[in-house]
Image (tube, grey):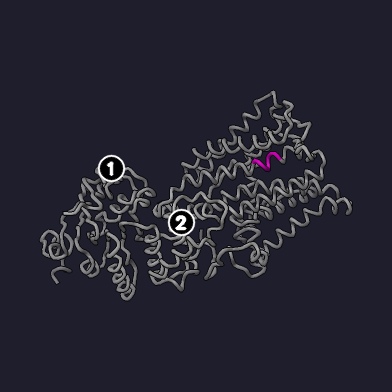
């Protein structure tokens, strides 16, 4: 990792001091816009953008989870979308069998994501570089084909979810069938994911993960068995991606194998790289840019990839650190 | 005779038929500075890599501090108190000098499965790390990004990282590599200070430094030990003169 670096590094990046830099401001602005979208978009005659924003936020959670291992840990998982599918199918299959209790669905979905991430990670983290990429891809495709082959749950046609997860607290009920309620649950969980990432990457654990990416040999030589920390990060990341998966299943009321097919995993990587790897808000910037651009471009022409592809190449070539890097340079802050 | 802190017997390591470490026996007594010298390609760095666990050995045993560590992983050896420095500076270049040392302090402080509290504001890590930077003379460079430190400063940082792991014994791979005369002089002085506290195995090309520092010297040629002894004995050893010291010793 050779990045242009300032002579000194800021110590302990508190959230308050972070407020001053551009990428954080933009990200917070985006979150604020997302907060008022359910009111503002219909008022502006564009109710369609409520759903667009909700989808962007769900992808932003998934991208944030991938950034945790890709951006901070150097683990290029090319099968990360599989956790969207695992969590989504857990919700979908339980609903299919008439278990719609969210207190059962959600913890179970995350538990299964964690266990599968543990198995996949335990094996793939034995490898490095391109082998790691191929193995994570292979594992994900395995489950993709499993999804296709199970006819009881719709095979490649997917599975409709008739009832969204139900949360009955006794004294009150969280009604996800209400679109606005679901929207704000997504919004809160996005903020929660980013905050959790913030805590993790700045903790002792986070120091180890980043150290193992920067200089694995040195890490071993100072007495840190890196594998178990990497594996833990991999599991946390898989579970966080599972949150996006169960939200997506609830939001779309539909789950299909396609959500864990490899192009989805590729898109997640693109979002992280586009927004800025290893930056807290990069994944949000990346998913907003990716999904809005594809949304807008696809209304112009069906060959929107022809425009999007070169755009991506330009960002990667000329904007190290992705959109976060561009924002920093615009405001004269050269932090990575 | 005191029991050796590090005892190596019949250690072998070869790369595709070429023996880089060939049946090496080595005893390092507690408190001594033991230097390993030898011409380029004698297998000095390989020996340190095998001793520190970064390379597996092919045969032989390594005992350290009453334990057989022949099969132990590199992190396990470090946690037992056998810490190494690298000939080619190995630091975390993208973070500050203080962060570098704090990470090693953190490793010595136990497991790192602490996912919530900010490590960069933890006085239990920052305090000892600052003290170590002070000790190696980098106190005023604490916040500088490690990759931007001058070469000599990076070598000092390397030592601070090693000390932060709370070792019993140091494996130093050419600590003075690429240093200026004045810097080497200062490091020499510092290593002599460290002798009070640590046992050291030292690889060094600077013969003046080796003969000034070492209690005992082992000469390695083609991976094989050809002599071990005090600096005087080594200087007088005809095999060593022929194989290695050459003109330098005659002068």
| Residue B39 visible at all | no
Up-down: is A263 above or below B35?
A: above
Discs 2 and 1 carry the same chain letter: yes
Question: Disc 2 marks which residue?
Answer: B106
Please tell me which residue is depicted at 62% across the width and 68% down the height of the picture.
Answer: A333
* Parent chain of label 2: B
Q: How many marks?
A: 2
Please tell me which residue is depicted at 34% across the width and 73% down the height of the picture.
Answer: B183
Say the numbered circle drawn on residue A234: none
Quick check: A162 left or right of B161? right
Which range of residues does the magenta coloring cover?
A242-246
The quarter in which the C terminus of chain A is drawn is bottom right
Q: CA distance from mark 2 to mark 1?
A: 32 Å
Question: Does residue A244 belong to the magenta stretch?
Answer: yes
Q: Please tell me whether mark 2 sits on a helix, a strand or a loop.
A: helix
Question: Disc 1 marks which residue?
Answer: B58
Up-down: is B117 above or below A235?
A: below
Please tell me which residue is depicted at 70% across the width and 36% down the height of the picture.
Answer: A103
Question: Quick one: A119 or A224, which is closer to the camera?
Answer: A224
């Amino acid at each position: 990792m050779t990045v242009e670096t300032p002579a000194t590094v800021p110590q302990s990046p508190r959230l308050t001091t972070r407020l001053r830099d551009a990428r954080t401001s933009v990200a917070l602005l985006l979150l604020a816009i997302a907060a008022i979208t359910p009111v503002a978009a219909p008022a502006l005659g564009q109710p369609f953008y409520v759903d667009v924003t909700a989808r962007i936020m769900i992808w932003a959670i998934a991208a944030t989870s991938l950034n945790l291992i890709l951006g901070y840990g150097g683990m290029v998982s090319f099968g990360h979308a599989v956790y969207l599918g695992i969590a989504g199918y857990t919700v979908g299959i339980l609903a299919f069998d008439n278990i719609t209790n969210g207190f059962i669905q959600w913890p179970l979905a995350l538990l299964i994501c964690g266990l599968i991430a543990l198995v996949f990670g335990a094996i793939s983290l034995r490898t490095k570089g391109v082998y790691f990429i191929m193995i994570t891809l292979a594992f994900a495709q395995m489950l993709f084909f499993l999804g296709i082959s199970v006819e009881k749950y719709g095979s490649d046609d997917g599975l409709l979810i008739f009832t969204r997860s139900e949360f009955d607290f006794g004294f009150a009920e969280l009604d996800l069938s209400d679109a606005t309620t679901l929207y704000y649950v997504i919004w809160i969980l996005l903020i929660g994911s980013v905050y959790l990432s913030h805590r993790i990457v700045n903790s002792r654990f986070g120091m180890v993960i980043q150290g193992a990416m920067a200089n694995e040999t040195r890490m071993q030589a100072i007495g840190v068995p890196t594998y178990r920390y990497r594996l833990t990060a991999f599991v946390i990341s898989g579970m966080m991606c599972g949150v996006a998966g169960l939200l997506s299943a609830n939001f779309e009321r539909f789950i299909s194998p396609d959500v864990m097919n490899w192009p989805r995993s590729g898109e997640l990587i693109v979002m992280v790289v586009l927004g800025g790897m290893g930056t807290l808000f990069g994944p949000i910037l990346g998913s907003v840019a990716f999904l809005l651009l594809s949304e807008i471009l696809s209304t112009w022409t069906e060959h929107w990839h022809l425009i999007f592809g070169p755009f991506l190449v330009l960002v990667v070539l000329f904007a190290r650190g992705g959109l976060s890097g561009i924002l920093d340079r615009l405001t004269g802050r050269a932090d990575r | 005779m005191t029991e050796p802190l590090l005892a190596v017997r019949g250690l072998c390591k070869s790369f595709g038929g070429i023996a880089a470490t060939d049946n090496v026996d080595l005893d390092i007594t507690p408190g001594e500075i033991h230097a390993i010298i030898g011409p380029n390609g004698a297998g000095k760095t390989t020996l340190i890599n095998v001793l520190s666990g970064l390379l597996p050995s092919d045969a032989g045993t390594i005992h350290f501090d009453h334990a057989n560590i022949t099969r132990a992983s590199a992190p396990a050896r470090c946690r037992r108190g056998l810490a190494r420095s690298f000939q080619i500076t190995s630091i975390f270049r993208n973070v500050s000098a203080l962060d570098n040392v704090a990470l090693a302090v953190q490793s010595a402080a136990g497991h790192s499965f602490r996912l919530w509290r900010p490590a960069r504001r933890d006085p239990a890590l920052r305090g000892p790390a600052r003290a170590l930077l002070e000790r190696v003379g980098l106190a005023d460079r604490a916040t500088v990004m490690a990759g931007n430190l001058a070469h000599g400063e990076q070598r000092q940082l390397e030592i601070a990282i090693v000390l932060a792991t709370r070792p019993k014994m140091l494996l130093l791979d050419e600590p003075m590599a690429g240093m200026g005369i004045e810097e080497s002089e200062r490091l020499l002085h510092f290593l002599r200070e460290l002798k009070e506290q640590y046992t050291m195995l030292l690889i060094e090309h600077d013969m003046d430094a080796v003969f000034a520092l070492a209690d005992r010297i082992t000469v390695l040629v083609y991976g094989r030990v050809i002599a071990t002894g005090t600096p005087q004995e080594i200087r007088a050893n005809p095999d060593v003169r022929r194989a290695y010291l050459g003109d330098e010793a005659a002068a």
